[in-house]
Amino acid sequence: MNWAEFFAMKGYAFYVWGSYGVALLVFAIEIMLIRNRRKQALRNLRLMRDEMGESV
Amino acid sequence: MKKMSLFGLLGLVVRRDLLLAMRRRADVLTTLIFFVMVVSLFPLGVGPEMDMLRKMAPGVVWVAALLASMLSLPRMFSADYADGTLEQMMLAPQSLSVLVLGKIVAHWMLSGLPLALIAPVLGLQFDMSAPALGTLVLALLLGTPVLSMIGAIGAALTLGLRGGGVLVSLLVLPLCIPVLIFGAGAVEAVTSGMSAASNLSFLGAFMLFALVFTPFVASQALRISME
Amino acid sequence: MAINWFKYSAPTTFYGLAGKLIPYFAWPAAILFAIGIYIGFFVAPTDATQSEAYRIIFLHVPASILSMFIYLIMAGYAALGLIFNTRLSSMMAQALAPTGALFAFVSLWSGALWGKPMWGAWWVWDARLTSELILLFLYLGYIALHASIEDTRRADKASALLAIVGSVNVPIIYFSVKWWNTLHQGATIKMSGTSMHIAMQQAMFAVMAACWLYAIAVALARVRGIILEREANTQWVNDLPEVKQMNGEHS
């Protein structure tokens, strides 16, 4: 199994790996955005709790 | 107030809206001038060759009609929303759908109808043949009500939002694509010698379908926005 | 023993359930995707007419199907939220929208990259690609409407109505675009027409299943984030273990 030949995809490498690459990139970005959103929500919750803690 | 039939109510709302619009005649004209301007821009962009323009004419006129009717959509409810009459309308015992239908008809008479009537003049700019112009007007008469009806849903949903004007177009234009396809298709069918009956019947079907559902959906949208 | 389905329709219990379920969807998705890619690239034979470029189909077809079905599922959740006033359904609809839009984008992107070697142009006004583009606009319209309304209750209901109207229009748009396309260009090459080699079908099925599991896992994860944001001032959220930790620790 010659990897170089495999990745060349008989000249269509750009198109094949271009579409799969962008798809995986898009999925990775989506996952990262969701984790970020969760972290942000938790940080806000803790800030609110700390403020409430001081004011009570 | 004597018992009023629904059609009487419809007529009342339409008359009221037309009266209001006539007081600020500029709004009606802006839609018309926008339509004429957009259509006249294309030859400047594409070049004066007549055969090219003749081929593009239906598409250009229809896209301009779509954009022009999007322009005046936010004003459909915003004036009444601002001074509270919309709330009164919603509290009225009569069905809100008929009131909304009245507003849609009024909006159509101020935007769709003028476009259809002035379209032949613009068609001459593109050297369109007489049958093509006839079909264009008929297609516009059948298609522009659908734009107003679907637009009413968009206007009701984006009531009172800042940047609502652009948002309405973003929401409504994808939904109006079938009308654009069959509208332009009708004129093109005639110019290429085929009969436009099928396209026009599709447009008629869309209009009836929209006529049945959009007033109710738009009134639901109003209830949501006004909560 | 009657299962009390409604127990899980409250955000409080659903938050915990979703958290436990995510790994059960995420890992099988990754594994199935790997299997699909392996079969698609190593087992499936080279296509006679398009040689290697056709392998993009294992991504393009699932993405297109996913983008269409997610829109209908999103409209379903939105309708549930509108009719039964269950806020979790509206949250679920809001959680699904970005994933559906991304699948539509992936479908368009892979369609363009597949079109270039096959039809010689990056963008071809093929009926399916055009309808996919319009579907992407519908997604963007839904997301834009939801984002532009501050009051979340009104945002949920307004975008729900738009999703329902959109889902009624999707078949009409697909039909009229197909009519418009065959009128001008004639039917382009139909991939599904050619009998697909068994390995191709296996690869397609594996990638499709992987995409479904991925979509569910991502939607569950995003809906948990939405629940945290919307139920921020409720007691049960503040009692959550991850909120209890000090700010510095990684949650």
Image (cartoon, coloured by chain):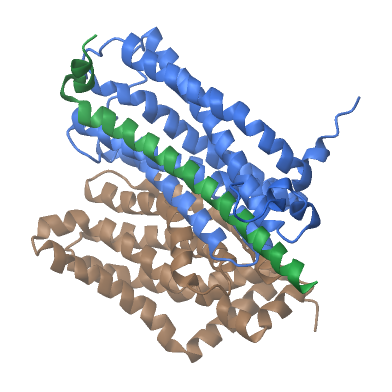
Q: Which chain is blue?
A: C
Q: Which chain is green?
A: A
Q: Residue C48's x, y, as percent? A: 22, 12
Q: Quadrant of the N terminus of chain A?
A: top left
Q: Is B29 displayed left or right of B216 in the figure?
A: left
Q: Is residue B213 visible?
A: no
Q: Is C96 displayed left or right of A52 in the figure?
A: left
Q: Nearer the viewer, residue B152 or C45?
A: C45
| Residue located 81% across and 71% down the image | A56
Q: Nearer the viewer, residue C147 or A25?
A: A25
| Residue that extends furthest to the right in the rendered view of this protein | C1
| Residue located 48% across and 63% down the image | B145
User: Up-down: is B63 above or below B32?
Assistant: above
Q: Is residue B5 visible?
A: yes
Q: Residue A26's x, y, as percent? A: 40, 41
Q: Residue C32's x, y, as percent? A: 49, 20
Q: Nearer the viewer, residue B28 or C28?
A: C28
Residue B123 image-quadrant placement: bottom left
| Residue located 48% across and 65% down the image | B168
Q: Which chain is brown?
A: B
